[in-house]
Amino acid sequence: MSQPLTIADLKTRARRRVPKMFFDYADSGAWTEGTYRANEEDFSKIKLRQRVLVDMTNRSLATTMAGQDASMPVALAPTGLCGMQHADGEMLAAKAAEEFGVPFTLSTMSICSIEDVASVTSKPFWFQLYVMKDRDFINSLIDRAKAAKCSALVLTLDLQVLGQRHKDLRNGLSAPPKWTLHHGIQLATKPFWCLDMLRTKRRGFGNIVGHAKNVSDLSSLSSWTAEQFDPQLSWADVAWIKERWGGKLILKGILDEEDARAAAGTGADAIIVSNHGGRQLDGAKSSISMLPRIVDAVGDQIEVHVDGGIRSGQDVLKAVALGAKGTYIGRPYLYGLGAMGKPGVTTALEIIRKELDVTMALCGKRDIQTVDHSVLAEMPF
Ligand SMILES: Cc1cc2nc3c(=O)[nH]c(=O)nc-3n(C[C@H](O)[C@H](O)[C@H](O)COP(=O)(O)O)c2cc1C
């Protein structure tokens, strides 16, 4: 098989290797998937400004995100069930990110636990928190993330109630997979995935089972998660979470200027302009199209990051040009992981780095820190 050259190549390979219910879980958005598509499509509306006869030697992509060094302005976004794209997926992705020098964010809804990831990494990773009604559980999660020396808490704000993804319902998605005939056929056609999965013991939600009250096994888990996301979460909750955590705080899921102003007022270190990869409010605008307005509103008060639809280094450059200090990729690394495990995550990062580096040079810039809207042919949104 030839070397994957694009994120789309990795997606094709992941589709071949990962059982349909888990591939679809990654490659899906809420309802009509309109916002999921818009996230990707709106990047192609942004045109770059070609420059010539500018010194393009000694280029640097290095930057910081929320005070943490990053070899390029890209972090791995938190993704639930990452360990179902590939056995021990979160541990593999975290190691790949560490070696590459970019932040890795572990989801509350991960398969490998905070402690699992800490056991295979030597630099701090970030932890993403979903706020559940069981506040004792949330406090203990925050304390576990502190004990594991996580260097930032990413608090997700856009999942107080769950958006609906039709594919997951049609596929009867569950972790671990159910043993119905339908699911058995899906698994039987992906033998390499199954072999890896048989070698690991990590097949449930590692941060939850055995830690949350009344969740001692997987049979009690699904009812617990369905009723636990807190629909009453408010800005006041951000204050006590910030206080209990006491470290770098990043607020994820801002898509509106008014919310951005409220977020800046909390004293958090950064916000992520995000619509959850089009998985929550279908019909919302793409993240990249909202980025310039949010940067205008709060860019002088708080660091602004963005995610959603980034599929190339060119997309990263465009996001930085529109004022993002950092970006996150979700599906691109999940496709790499599903396709090839840890080397696949590294390949996804390498593809993006190379595209970013060459694009920056052809736009006449040598240092990512100096990239601004002058690299764009016109302001798109
Ligand atoms: C399969 C999958 C699972 C996700 N799980 C979470 C999660 O557990 N917590 C969270 O804050 N965001 C989650 N997200 C959203 C991502 O963090 C991120 O916002 C999104 O993937 C960015 O869009 P992209 O996939 O187009 O890069 C998930 C996204 C995907 C694709």
Image (cartoon, rainbow, N blue to C red):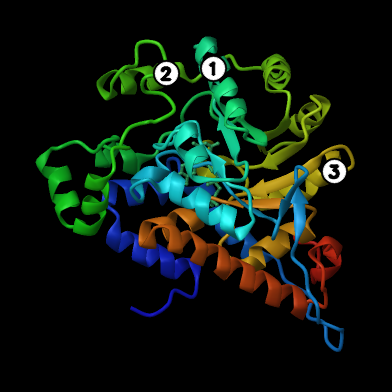
Who is closer to the viewer here, 81 or 50?
81
Element assignment for label 2: loop
Question: Identity of the amino acid at label 1?
Answer: Ser
Q: Residue furthest right?
A: 300
Nearer the viewer's eye, disc 1 or disc 3?
1
Q: Position of residue 276 (x, y in %)?
A: 55, 41
Q: Which mark is residue 211?
A: 2
Q: Which mark is residue 299?
A: 3
Q: Are marks 2 and 1 in contact (CB under 8 Å)?
A: yes
Q: Position of residue 230 (x, y in %)?
A: 53, 17
Give the CA distance from mark 2 to mark 1: 8 Å
Q: Position of residue 183 (x, y in %)?
A: 17, 44
Residue at image location 49% in from the left, 33% down from the top: 114
Where 222 falls versus 296 (above or below)? Answer: above
Element assignment for label 3: loop
Q: Which mark is residue 140?
A: 1
Give the CA distance from mark 1 to mark 3: 33 Å
Task: Say left or right for 96 vs 45.
Answer: left
Who is closer to the viewer here, 129 or 88?
88
Q: Are marks 1 and 3 in contact (CB under 8 Å)?
A: no
Where 58 falls versus 321 (above or below)? Answer: below
Residue at image location 57% in from the left, 68% down from the top: 350
Residue at image location 32% in from the left, 60% down from the top: 15
Quarter placement of the C terminus: bottom right
Question: Identity of the amino acid at label 3?
Answer: Gly
Where 16 falls versus 264 (above or below)? Answer: below
N-terminal-most mark, 3 or 2: 2
Quarter placement of the N terminus: bottom left
Give the CA distance from mark 3 to mark 2: 39 Å
